[in-house]
Image (tube, rainbow, N blue to C red):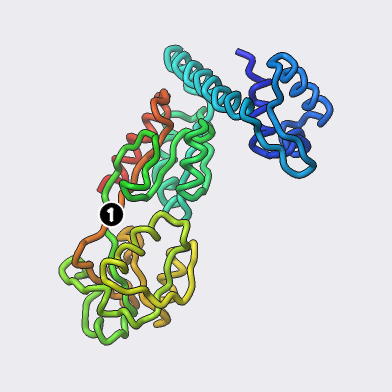
Amino acid sequence: MDTKQIEYILKIAEENNITRAAEKLHVTQPALNQQLLRLERELGLPLFYRSRTNWRPTEAGEIYLENARKMLNIKQDTYRILGDMADRRKGTLSVGFTPGRGITMFSDVYPHFHRKFPEVTVEPRELSVKKQQALIAHGDLDLGFQTLCETQRTAADYILIRREELFLALPGGHPLAEGLSPQDYHNRELSVSSVQYEPFVLMYQESTIRQLVDGIFAQAGFRPQVLFETANTPTILSMIRNHLCCGIIPEHYIDPHDNGIIYFSLPSHPSWDLVISSRKGAYLSKAARYFIRLSTELWGN
């Protein structure tokens, strides 16, 4: 099934520029332009508005791109089904992980997976949840490991690995944390309003956790003093440990032996989901299903 022309047009749309698209496809710009002109003559409609810096799809182009992606997805699913029928344990599996916990998850799962599917090349990609969602929707990412709330799910398929609670984190020397053991955080509660005049370091606005954290502050009736925003939870932990701020932390990152940070349950016990996402209705190969099974077994508790 030759879909090269379709892939050419999708790359132009992805790059918004024919020269960059040609470079990524390893073809010359004139050759790529000829492919596009030939298709436009065949269709009788232009597919792109041309400019030096930005190529945008026309209305006809949007229709072509939407259905072109569907055709590539059908090809992808067809080859996977036939590959499984032939018990052909080769190919690639692209997997998205969020920054932070992603490398730990991959390191846990991959050795077990590789023993059963040694000839399947796994392509791990460290991506934000929103980038994963866009790539999955287009069929450019097979599986995505994501942390999000129910309201942040898209029109994709989701498998729940586990639900994870968020905790209020204070420096070990804080007056409200004095004399407390770091291990006993499940059995004590503290409202975030108790530290409303303290500075906080939060995850950046576009992160999926930020919507949940902002909701915690809104429910408590105040806006926090934000020292700064980061894309890295360990950065927040380091600053709490150094008595610079407070934070709200997913349980995955809690070290119950770290005396430098004392954690508290929040009265509302906010939580989010660790999930595996894939394109809606996509055929998952035997290799993909085994990767999912390992992940749920290793990370489900």
Residue 232, how many percent across, how many down?
47, 63
Q: Residue at x 36, y 71 (%)?
A: 247
Residue 134, how many percent across, how many down?
50, 40
The quarter of the picture where the N terminus appears is top right
Residue 20, how many percent across, how many down?
75, 39
Q: 129 or 79, which is in the foreground?
A: 129
Kind of residue at disc 1: Glu
Q: Residue at x 67, y 20 (%)?
A: 4
Q: Quadrant of residue 249?
A: bottom left
Residue 242 sits above or below residue 34 on the image = below
Q: 299 or 151, which is in the foreground?
A: 151
Residue under numbered circle 1: 164
Q: Is residue 72 left or right of residue 292?
A: right
| Mark 1 Cα shell of 10 Å, populated few (<14), some (14-19), many (≥20) | some
Q: Residue at x 51, y 17 (%)?
A: 79
Residue 104, how many percent across, how many down?
42, 52
Q: Quadrant of residue 276?
A: top left
Residue 193 sits above or below residue 151 on the image = below
Residue 251 sits above or below residue 155 on the image = below
Q: Is residue 267 left or right of residue 237?
A: left
Q: Residue at x 77, y 22 (%)?
A: 37
Q: Is residue 99 left or right of residue 13?
A: left
Residue lying farthest right?
A: 30
Report how many numbered discs are placed on residues in the image: 1
Residue lying farthest left?
A: 187
Assign a secondary structure to mark 1. Answer: strand
Residue 163 sits above or below residue 165 on the image = above
Q: Is residue 180 left or right of residue 140?
A: left
Q: 91 or 44, which is in the foreground?
A: 44
